[in-house]
Image (spheres, grey):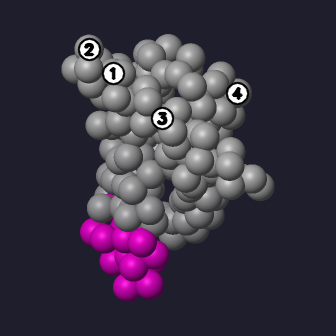
Amino acid sequence: MNDAHLHLVVNHFPIIGTILALGILITGMFLKNNSVKNTAYVLFVVAAIFVALSMQTGEGAEEMVEDMPSIGKQIIHEHEEIAEKLALALYVLAGISIAGLFLNFKNHSKAKFVSIIALTVAVATVYIAQLVGTSGGEIRHTEIRAKTNSSDLLQDTENTIKVDKEHNEK
């Protein structure tokens, strides 16, 4: 298994995990249930761990695909820049989540305030995660790129098919 494959394996959890955890956190806050909020906090921490793995495998994946036709270094660079912002946001959210877990276990009066901060940061993080997912998908899925010319899209698709065919023949 190479870095590109590993990157594809681990890069979805930070996005999906953060979205799922946000829904769980909202539910926990609505129900005023610390166990449900703690579940969200743990998922945020796990998402941060997976984003670290995704960042580590991203460099190797970049080197494997950056010179392929219809990909190029610019689109990968844009994805990498947004991914770095997501990583930072998830690391901050993980820190807040660890504080939330600690305060919930201690039944501290500031636990509710921390959950509000976590909610705010999580909403922003989900937005960044959506941007990362879209920019990552655009690397190999030319059909989702913003195109003004349908012949460009057709050419990108033909180039991708050609590269995939050549790769499979090796």
Q: Which mark is residue 160?
A: 3
User: Which quarter of the picture shows residue 48?
Assistant: top left
Q: Is residue 24 magenta?
A: yes
* Residue 10 horizontal side relative to residue 139, left or right: left
| Inter-mark Cα distance, 3 to 1 | 10 Å
Q: Position of residue 47 (x, y in %)?
A: 39, 45
Check if mark 2's residue and mark 1's residue have beta carbons within 8 Å: yes
Residue 167's tag is: 1
- Tell me which residue sits at (43%, 26%) in the image: 163
Residue at 53 percent across and 22 percent down: it is 68
Q: Quadrant of residue 19?
A: bottom left
Which element carries disc 4, helix, strand or loop?
helix
Q: Residues within 10 Å of mark 3 (few under 14, many from 20)?
A: some
> The residue under label 2 is which amino acid type?
Lys
Type of the residue with mark 3: Thr
Q: Secondary structure at mark 2?
A: loop
Question: Which class describes the residues within 10 Å of circle 4: few (<14), some (14-19), or many (20+)?
Answer: few
Q: Rounded to the nearest whole Å, what is the CA distance between mark 2 and mark 4?
A: 27 Å
Image quadrant holding the C terminus, namely: top left
Instruction: Name the residue tied to disc 4.
Output: 74
